[in-house]
Image: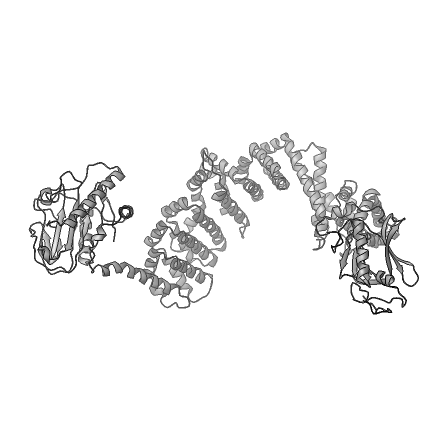
Amino acid sequence: MQTGKCNRVTPSPCLRSPGNPCAGPGPPSATMSDTRRRVKLYALNEDRQWDDRGTGHVSSSYVEKLKGMSLLVRAESDGSVLLESKIKPNTAYQKQQDTLIVWSEAENYDLALSFQEKAGCDEIWEKICQVQGKDPSVDITQDLLDESEEERYDDMPEAAPAVELPPCELGRLVDIAELVSTSLAMPVRREKLMLVLETEGYIKKLLELFHMCEDLENTDGLHHLFQIFKGIFLLNSTAIFEVMLSDSCVMDVVGCLEYDPSLPEPKRHRDFLNTTARFKEVIPICDPELKQKIHQTYRAQYIQDVILPTPSLFEENLVSCLSSYIFFNKVDIVKLLQEDEKYLTELFAQLTDEATDDEKRRELVNFLKEFCAFSQTLQPQDRDNFFKALSCLGILPALEVVLGMDDAQVRNAATDIFSYIVEYSPSMVREFVVQEALQNDDDILLINLIIEQMICDTDPELGGAVQLVALLRTLIDPENMLATANKTEKTEFLSFFYKHCMHVLTAPLLANTAEDKPGKDDFQTAQLLSLTLELLTFCVEHHTYHIKNYIMNKDLLRRVLVLMNSRHSFLALCALRFMRRIVGMKDELYNRYIIKGNLFDPVVRAFLNNGSRYNLLNSAVIELFDFIRTEDMKPLIMHIVENFYKGFEDIDYVNTFKGLKMRYEQERDRMETPKADSTTPLLRNHRFRRDMRTLEEEEEIWFDDEDEVEDEEAVVPPSEKTKSEEDFIDHLGKFIERKKAKDNEDTDLLAKPSVAPAALGTKPESPVLKLSLSVNAAPSAGLGPMLGLSLSPSASGAGGSAGGGGSSGVTTALCSEKPLSPLGGSCSGTVGGGALSPTAPLSPASPGAVSSSVATISISAKRGLVGLVDYPDDEDDEEEEEEDDDEEEVNETPPSKRARLES
């Protein structure tokens, strides 16, 4: 926009314009009032540039012919009217930069008044706000961003000029096309054009011109008609669509759209619709309204998808009404068909009738597919009623019949129908197949038919198989399974699936992995197996119990890892992903299964065979081992380092394997640490006076340990008791009584006699208590370097004996529950460096110096050993314990739980 400098007598602010701070000349003799009201008028042209319409003085007054308060701008030079604009209630006026007022007229062109002074701008702005009932403190009178287009034009004033269409003549087609084209960009003009086209029958007059142009072979006229009708479609008016898509007009409209100027030759859409496209009634439709609606919807869909050019980014919202028109037509069709009960009953009867020929059944299936596709347009409540009606009519049994046919096209259509049902209600399908399993064999179950179709997909890209895998995943997903008070869908269905269907799913996998390498390794087989593995991986993550049993029973992971040898890297990665998911479960049973089967071997071999290549396989294997390292999965770390670390020693581009080695060494050091500390004196009186709550917690841990050895007794020669020992015995007696009361056990105990009660001074009726205690005694006690005590309240006979020696520790041998000989039983060991045997009588003052000692308490109860045990750091003693365990296993002594608590 070009503007000039302001000419004024006194130094005053320049007139401001939308594009320039200064505006045109003013008279040299302007008064102060004239200066305040002095403005420059601008209008926005088609190129979005501001045109200067002149300088004048603005006022606000009532104009009779406009019937309202208006803005008047009279030219400064001759007093002519430059602007006469009614202040409308719904027009958005904006005040900018304190001296500028901008708005859009009803004819949809923008105007601006640039004031010389701020005071004049404020004065006119107050007048505008007063008329519209707005607050003058705001800078915009209407919030156009928040109101819909429909609301904006509902109150369009009658005084706004209407769109006048040129006469419908051949010579005016150019003008008509230009008018329609320019109106599309202006909402107000578009609304007015729609009103004219709806009320004046203009469309039918245009179609008459179309026939004239075709008869005269007027190509230019036909091109103009194409532009006109394309623009009319973009007006987005449902009322106009009703006219153009009516039976009397639709073919002529299609004819107009054949003459696209951008194409060298016109398309023959009418020939296709009249001859090629045939309406088939697989079952006769008696309702004429329904039949007409089907024809109308098909033609509208054809126009939208085939004839009309693809809308640009700015035109997408201009064809929404056509999409809505088609949408609601489909809703009407579904409802009309659903209301005709005889029609649907006949449809399913013919579909399942064995006498129906294949061609007829193909047409029925295709019709049912279209019917279900239309149902996607229904509202949720209507869709519920639709699928419930189909279920009552037997759609799932009908699909079983269709899926068993040899016709691939029919099976594909049936798969599409099945996908609609699964998407709507997986529970409906699950309930059907569970009930079906009670009556039919596995071979004809619906889900097995789906799995077989997936396996037998002839498409090289397995497009159908991919779709079926997605459906199966939806069906076996526990997240969408229901749980009620009476039954749990998850439990019932998963039990059914793993019993009746899983063997069908895994059959190709197991058949192809019988050897050390895949039996078939072509691309299509690899794709199929990858889809199967994808589904199995999903099961590992979501079906922890069922899939775990299946993997263990079938040794499935070993078979899957055979695929690591496939020449297709994507299949090897699928196998690795399956194992990664299993390891990621961090399940002890899975870990034992992997270690026992040495199932890391195929993974390590594939990794080493891959060499130094930096690819997905390399990264995936490293990630697997790094996960094991970061999660500190000790059994797997021990297994990997002990069996495979030599192959990883030279790998230094990642720290994963060195980290595994470090974890391994840390674990070994931790396991050896208690043995190193056992040389220090471990017996402390306070160790036997711990809180009973602690003892109970540790005892629970002891009983929960499943890997302990069988019941054994610790027998040492008896010796004189001290007061502290008596206190300790009383303490343990109370502990045993509490244990008995807690477990509600019988008083019948399974202990065997060890030594006579009289020798220990205990009551025969006390609970069975076997105590082996060795402590360092002070020289002043007069008992020598060691005090030994063996306690058995219900035993009879003499105890063992001990001899002295120079050992620095005390070792006790635990013997199984067997009757003891009169000489004290069959236990032997060393005490204070001497030998413990039934034939060596014990002297309270046996010679031998002991630097440290260990207290060992073994309490024999009905269900196992309960007590506090310290284990000496003597490897010979551990070997003796293992030998005793072996003897017990050979003698087939019944095992019982034994737990150990380390202080």
Residue 89 place in picture, x, y as percent: 79, 48
Q: In this view, which residue lies farthest toward the top?
A: 342
The reply to whether residue 611 is in sight is yes
In the image, residue 488 sits, relative to residue 881, either above or below, namely above
Q: Residue at x 43, y 47 (%)?
A: 506
Task: Tell me: 195 left or right of 739.
Answer: right
Residue 59 place in picture, x, y as percent: 86, 56
In the image, residue 802 sits, relative to residue 744, either above or below, namely below
Residue 285 place in picture, x, y as percent: 68, 33
Q: Nearer the viewer, residue 538 or 397?
A: 538
The reply to whether residue 816 is in sight is no
Q: Nearer the viewer, residue 56 or 866?
A: 56
Quarter the N terminus occupies: bottom right
In the image, residue 476 sits, relative to residue 345, either above or below, namely below
The colour scheme is one colour
In the image, residue 624 sits, relative to residue 340, either above or below, namely below
Task: Tell me: 351 left or right of 865.
Answer: right
Residue 652's image quarter?
bottom left
Q: In this view, which residue lies farthest toward the front?
A: 32
Q: Residue at x 59, y 38 (%)?
A: 358
Residue 407 place in picture, x, y as percent: 56, 42
Q: Residue at x 16, y 51 (%)?
A: 773
Q: Tag count in the figure?
A: 0
